[in-house]
Image (cartoon, grey):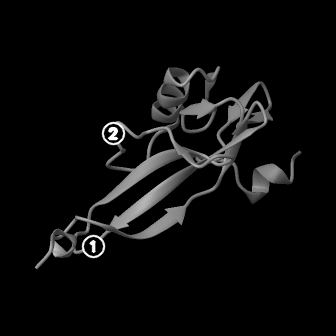
Amino acid sequence: MGSSSRPGSRVVREIDHDSFEIDDVTYVIRELVWNGIDGRSYDLHRVADDVVLTEDKSFNAYPTNAQVAEVLTRHGVDVELEVCVFCEDDVLLATAHRHGRGWVGDSCCWDERLRATE
């Protein structure tokens, strides 16, 4: 039995979640499914050159906007966070939607009802 048959030793599937743009650069969270285990890992990729920005350490759960911002900042990307007026989570300003006097997170609370008010 080779090392590739050990549980958690190889990626069997990659799932790209919704991409987002900051300063005309596209990024995506890529979910990695490993052989023989239930656990998943998540990496932040720059799409244009498929660079893994979380190469040093993947996330064990889908990353929060604050975690994404921290990684991007370490890579020299100027990232601003705001607070969603509904759930009060941190949201990436580049992907947030203006609503009333505040911001609504694209990934947390922005839905069809709010889209209709644009």
Which residue does the image show at 54% across and 32% down from the upper left? 88
Which residue occupies the foreground of this view, 47 or 71? 47
Which residue occupies the foreground of this view, 58 or 2? 2
**Residue denoted by label 1:** 35
- Say which quarter of the image contains residue 58: top left
SS category of the residue bearing label 2:
loop
Give x and y (percent) for residue 117. 87, 47
Which residue does the image show at 15% across and 74% down from the upper left? 2
Q: Residues within 10 Å of mark 2 (few under 14, many from 20)?
A: few
From what the image shows, is residue 42 above or below residue 103? Answer: below
Which residue does the image show at 22% across and 75% down from the upper left? 36
Which residue occupies the foreground of this view, 56 or 88? 56
- Say which quarter of the image contains residue 13: bottom left
Separation of residues labelled 1 and 2 (CA atoms)? 19 Å
Number of marks in the rendered image: 2
Which residue does the image show at 10% across and 79% down from the upper left? 1
Q: Which mark is residue 45?
A: none
Q: Quadrant of the C terminus?
A: top right
Q: Is residue 71 left or right of residue 61?
A: right
Give x and y (percent) for residue 48. 69, 47
**Residue denoted by label 2:** 57
Which residue occupies the foreground of this view, 50 or 116? 50
Residue at the far bottom in the pictured view: 1
Which badge, 1 or 2, comes first in the chain's sequence?
1
Q: Is residue 27 left or right of residue 59?
A: right
Give x and y (percent) for residue 116. 86, 54
SS category of the residue bearing label 1:
loop
Q: Amino acid at mark 1?
A: Asn
Q: Is residue 118 left or right of residue 61?
A: right
Q: Residues within 10 Å of mark 1 (few under 14, many from 20)?
A: some
Q: Amino acid at mark 2?
A: Lys
